[in-house]
Amino acid sequence: MSDPAPFELPDAVRDEFVAVVGRDNALVADEERDEYRDPYWPTEDRTYDSSLVLFPTTTEQVQDIVRVANHHEVPVWASSQGRNNGYGGPSARVKGSVLISFRRMNRVLEVDTELAYAVVEPGARWYDLYDVLHEQGDELLLSVPDIGWGSVIGNSLDNGQTFLPNGSDFNTLNGLEVVLADGSLLRTGFGAQEGNPTWHLYKRGLGPVVDPLFAQSNYGIVTKAGVWLQRRPKAYAPLYLSVPRYHQLAQVIDVVRELRLGGILRGIPYVLDLLTVGDAHFPEYKGKIPPPGTPVMGEERLDAIADETGLGRWGVRTALWGDPEVVDVHERRIREAWSAIEGGEVRRLATYTAENWHEIKDAGLIDRISGGVPSSDILDSLPDFVGHVGFSPVVPLRGEDVTKVVQQIKDKVVERTGVNFSAQVFVTNDRSAIVVSAMFFNRHDAGHLRATIDTAKELLVQLGQQGYAEYRSHLDFSDLAQDQLAFGDHAYRHFAETIKDAVDPKGILSPGRHGIWPARYRAR
């Protein structure tokens, strides 16, 4: 689909929206709204500008906002913290949309220590929920992503990765409260029954299961969700598994797969190259590993850095959780499997029990992330001039598949952008992985950003022809990403659009999100 015409918000309708939340909870002027956009997108490029930003503080306000939008047929675009930088941030696909931000709906509503779950609003960050759990004595752990400033609900609904066992296959959220396009309120699963105590405990319901329809979709706005937590284990051991040479990636993937299938590795094992390991994971080597976005460095030099630091060209960040004797047995099994990789090493970075659990907060990044403590270390380690564009296809968890995809992305990135390639492989379950390629560029060079965006588009088509697709896409090429799902003359897209037109007949909720458009825009 070609770019839709920008929406122009009448002043009178703008005032109706602002009256719902109050002027202090709205960004009206251009200079105000310029602070609420993807910082990696050039300021002078107005392609995805908004016309208004609203910060509701209650579900009832969200309902009122949606009712105004529905009445006047105004496109609205909701985000939780709006920090999905590298994918478009909080910006909307249709220029001139009204943005709804949940940064001021950020409460932790409930924590049930007996059944190990919490209930949060969409603006609650990983930091916010962790702080509550920490104040309660760290009896429960939250599966966290690499950067803690995002929303628990927002990141999870966009299929973001977290690393403890509940992160496997996006298992964190359960039981949603959703504002629909007419302003009515839906509760999924057994939330459909007033007072049902299993709303956040049972992942089904009676009849069709609709919770997944609100992940990466534009069918409704989630205003509350249950979050499954993990009981603190008797022992926790963060591990770093190193691999000396780049060409050994295929063997690494196959060994990790068998350890996962055997129940030895849990959570999301995170395979990362030397450049991704960087200063954030091992600050003692600060200055020795080139930062992202720097000019391409030769393989011999990278091998030398890998050997000098002992970090290897690839590393696997993972952990073990359980009774001490189980942790020891599983570590032994990992060491046996890893011994098949020439030069591979296994490091147990620490062992945490109830006696020293308080030390995790001040430990290294790997210890904290796998221990459920959110961090901003990776973000803080990026040079100020560096931005990135996410490109992340899903591949079978076979060494040959992962290596084939990684090599194609690397070749294209190096050729087109001239910077070091940085790869991360998220092992999402026992059988698949996401190759997350953070394509770095100079934020102060609009031409470099455009070259990076064009590279991602070329790769979308190139890998799409081989049967690989993105797990989420940047706002600027979401239509192209959706185009790759062409089976049955795009039967999936037609089905998704049919649902869209049924639940949002005026097409106001996030039109164009991940390439799904309502009828009013398709007709154009």
Image (tube, rainbow, N blue to C red):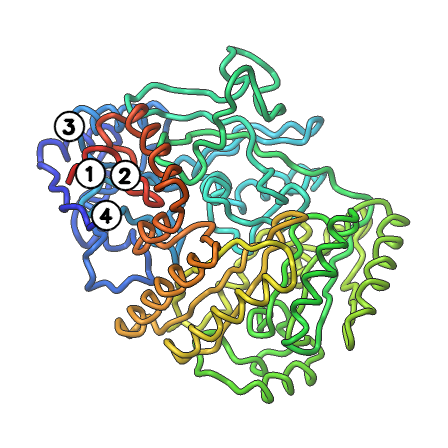
Q: Nearer the viewer, mark 1 or mark 4?
A: 4
Question: Which dot marks residue 339?
Answer: none
CA separation, marks 3 and 2? 18 Å
Which numbered dot is residue 517? 2
Q: Amino acid at mark 1?
A: Tyr
What is the secondary structure assignment of the residue under circle 2? loop
Marks 2 and 1 in Cβ contact (< 8 Å): yes
Count residues near mark 3 (Cα–Cα under 10 Å), then give few for <14, some for 14-19, many for 20+: some
Mark 3 or 4: the one toward you: 4
Closer to us: 79 or 506: 506
Q: Secondary structure at mark 4?
A: loop
Locate the C terminus and report the quarter of the image it occupies. top left
Mark closer to the chain start, 3 or 4: 4
List x then y, in percent, for residue 375.
Answer: 56, 56
- Which circle marks residue 1 in the picture? 4
Residue 53, quarter of the rendered image: top left
Q: Give the side of residue 239 with respect to residue 521, left or right.
A: right
Q: Mark 1 sits on what residue? A: 521
Viewer-side residue, 23 vs 209: 209
Where disc 3 sits, the SS reads helix
Considering every residue shown, the one lying at the far front of the view is 488
The residue under label 3 is: 72
Q: Is residue 137 left or right of residue 442?
A: right
Do the numbered discs 1 and 3 sit on residues whose CB atoms are within 8 Å? no
390 to the left or right of 99: right
Could you give the CA–CA distance between mark 1 and mark 3, rounded to whole angstroms? 16 Å
Looking at the rendered structure, the kind of residue marked 2 is Trp
User: Mark 4: which amino acid?
Assistant: Met
Q: Position of residue 178 (x, y in %)?
A: 41, 26
Tag 3–tag 2 contact (CB < 8 Å): no
Classed neighbour count for the residue bearing mark 1: other residues with Cα under 10 Å, few (<14), some (14–19), many (≥20): some
Q: Name the residue located 59 percent from the left edge and 67 percent from the top edge.
A: 403
